[in-house]
């Protein structure tokens, strides 16, 4: 048996079986199609906002990316708690995958918000409570990845990362509620009533609501879980490669 064939062998109960691999590939195709449908509704079908113009369309992806990163970070919390209870590496794989995918999606949230802010607020960045909390969230999860890289002992690394990942989710919750509890934010509340001093709000017409709902659904229910699943498979391969390297 060559190295490539041995890499395909499962390393744990969580390794995808051939049937699971087929399901994942079908879900990947469905995700791509869903993203295309969401992009169509966001970029074409939804009407142009009379106040902001086409730049308002960024919000369809900005809001959806934040919803998706919240799902990924929640998966990391679940994986971290499950690892602390069972000490099974497969749950650590879920936690790591959730953080890495969520970190990538949170960067999309941050950068799309900056692109929207430039023509609306006439600046790329302002220390608004919502923007500041989002930046803190991103940096918190960046620190998670740095923590994992700084600890060599596998068991200690997994345990500390699990605890950190659970606590870090507080920044996600804080980022979501900050614009609903701080009266001085100028960031519009897309879902719910906007603060009185929000700058850049827009009326939620039926077309906007449909486009926002479709994109949020696709990103949260398809994109985030599928990316996490693919990342788990990759981590399983990495672990198997490390085992083979140790044998050699």
Image (cartoon, rainbow, N blue to C red):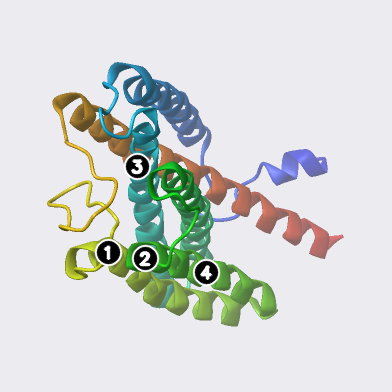
Please say if 26 is above or below 179: above
- The residue that mark 4 highlights is 139
Chain-order first, disc 4 or disc 3: 3
- State the image quarter where residue 211 is shown: top left
Q: Residues within 10 Å of mark 4 (few under 14, many from 20)?
A: few
Q: Residues within 10 Å of mark 2 (few under 14, many from 20)?
A: some
- The residue that mark 2 highlights is 128
Judged from the image, the secondary structure of the residue bearing numbered disc 2 is loop
| Left or right relative to 47: residue 59 | right
> Which residue is more in the foreground, 119 or 130?
119
- The residue that mark 1 highlights is 185
Specify whether residue 14 is in view: no
Please say if 7 is above or below 174: above
Q: Residues within 10 Å of mark 3 (few under 14, many from 20)?
A: many
- The residue that mark 3 highlights is 64
> Which residue is more in the foreground, 116 or 143?
116
Residue 19 drawn at (x, y percent): 47, 31
The quarter of the rendered structure image containing the C terminus is bottom right
Judged from the image, the secondary structure of the residue bearing numbered disc 4 is helix
How much space separates mark 4 and mark 1, taking CA atoms? 21 Å
């Amino acid at each position: 048996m060559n190295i490539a064939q041995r890499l395909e062998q499962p390393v744990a109960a969580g390794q995808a079986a051939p049937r699971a691999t087929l399901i994942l590939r079908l879900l990947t195709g469905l995700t791509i199609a869903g993203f295309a449908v969401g992009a169509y509704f966001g970029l074409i079908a939804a009407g142009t906002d009379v106040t902001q113009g086409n730049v308002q369309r960024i919000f369809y992806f900005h809001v959806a990316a934040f919803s998706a990163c919240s799902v990924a970070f929640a998966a990391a919390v679940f994986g971290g708690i499950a690892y602390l209870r069972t000490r099974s590496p497969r749950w650590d794989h879920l936690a790591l995958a959730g953080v890495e995918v969520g970190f990538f999606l949170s960067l999309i949230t941050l950068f799309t918000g900056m692109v929207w802010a430039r023509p609306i607020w006439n600046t790329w960045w302002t220390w608004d409570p919502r923007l500041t909390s989002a930046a803190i969230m991103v940096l918190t999860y960046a620190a998670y990845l740095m923590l994992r890289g700084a600890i060599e002992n596998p068991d200690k690394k997994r345990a500390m990362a699990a605890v950190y990942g659970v606590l870090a989710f507080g920044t996600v919750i804080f980022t979501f509620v900050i614009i609903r509890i701080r009266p001085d934010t100028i960031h519009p509340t897309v879902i719910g009533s906007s603060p009185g001093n929000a700058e850049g709000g827009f009326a939620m017409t039926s077309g906007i609501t449909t486009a926002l709902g479709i994109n949020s659904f696709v990103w949260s229910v398809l994109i985030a879980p599928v990316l996490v699943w693919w990342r788990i498979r990759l981590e399983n391969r990495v672990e198997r490669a490390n085992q083979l390297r140790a044998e050699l």
